[in-house]
Amino acid sequence: MKEKKGFSLNGFVAFVILLLVVGYLVTEVITAQVGFATFAIFALVILSLPGFFMVQPNQAKVMTFFGSYVGTVKNNGLQWSIPFFIRKNISLRIRNFESNQMKVNDNHGNPIEIATVVVWSVDDTAEAVFEVDDYISFVNIQSESALRNMAISYPYDQHDGDEVALRSHPQEVSEALKNEIQQRLEKAGVKVHEARISHLAYAPEIANAMLQRQQAQAIIAARSKIVDGAVGMVDMALTQLSAKQIVELDEERKATMVSNLLVVLCSDQNTQPIVNAGSLY
């Protein structure tokens, strides 16, 4: 069922027409020319009064007639339609939905806590009212289901260089989550404007262990950079000493010098120098 435009007239124009008809009826009563036609017109005026209704900005009226969908009115302001139409108000404004924090397993089987914020609005009023029983509840349930399905498709942390992870690729994950939710809400006439992760963390039972692993990985990465730099500095020192012929070192002395320089450069604490006041040998 798709949305279609419903029949309606400008309420102010319809009100003016009713005033003219009422004026005509008053004239008939004053001139004592009351007949069947006068009573019929008066009855029509009374019956037409419930046909007036108000449409607020970014809202719509879904109209049915004896169980049949006859159209949707989106024109703002005072409107008039056939009084026998049953009108249901539906909001077209943008809404936010924040899911509860859910505990799921990521792609590597690690338990994590995750939540999302979904920005959505009604795009097709007929589908929102008639295709699902309660479109608001439908949005909430399907959003959480899509979030759970998305969370098990990606790892929490990036392990490979080109791997998409929940923590390291927020834009890619948000786009995938938005598409997943939009596919589920297509039949409900709902348009998803944005979907982003609002909470992401390891589950409490493994949070400390994962924090230690992250710290260890950071320490290893930092040490690797320090060692690379220290080896380069040692090589540069030996090369310059040999090129400028400052001192000639045998292999044993070179090994000792390399060991001392690496200790100085790679140590995480300040080293205490020892000055040799004697001869070289």
Image (tube, grey):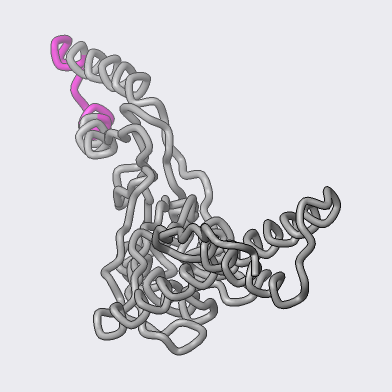
Left or right, residue 91 beside residue 6: left
Of residues 57 and 13, the one drawn nearer to the viewer in this rendering:
57
Of residues 263 and 175, the one drawn nearer to the viewer in this rendering:
263
Report the residue at 46% width, 40% height from top: 7
Left or right, residue 217 beside residue 104: right
| Residue 120 in magenta stretch | no
Chief secondary structure of the magenta portion: helix
Instruction: Residue lying at the far right in this picture: please name it.
Output: 243
- Quarter-wise, where is residue 112 in the image? bottom left
x and y percentages locating residue 166 in the rendered image: 49, 68
x and y percentages locating residue 206 in the rendered image: 31, 84
Report the residue at 35% width, 32% height from top: 57
- Quarter-wise, where is residue 67 in the image? bottom left
- Quarter-wise, where is residue 229 in the image? bottom right
Of residues 146 and 151, the one drawn nearer to the viewer in this rendering:
151
| Residue 34 in magenta stretch | yes
x and y percentages locating residue 71 in the rendered image: 46, 50
Task: Magenta stretch: give its range.
Answer: 28-41
Report the label total: 0
Left or right, residue 64 beside residue 160: left
Report the residue at 49% width, 54% height from top: 191
Instruction: Residue lying at the far bottom in this picture: please name it.
Output: 109
Q: Is residue 183 visible?
A: no
Say if 97 sits above or below 257 in the image: above
Say if 194 sits above or below 140 in the image: above
Say if 15 sits above or below 132 in the image: above
Report the residue at 68% width, 74% height from top: 255
Q: Is residue 262 visible?
A: yes
The quarter in which the C terminus is drawn is: bottom right
x and y percentages locating residue 100 in the rendered image: 26, 69
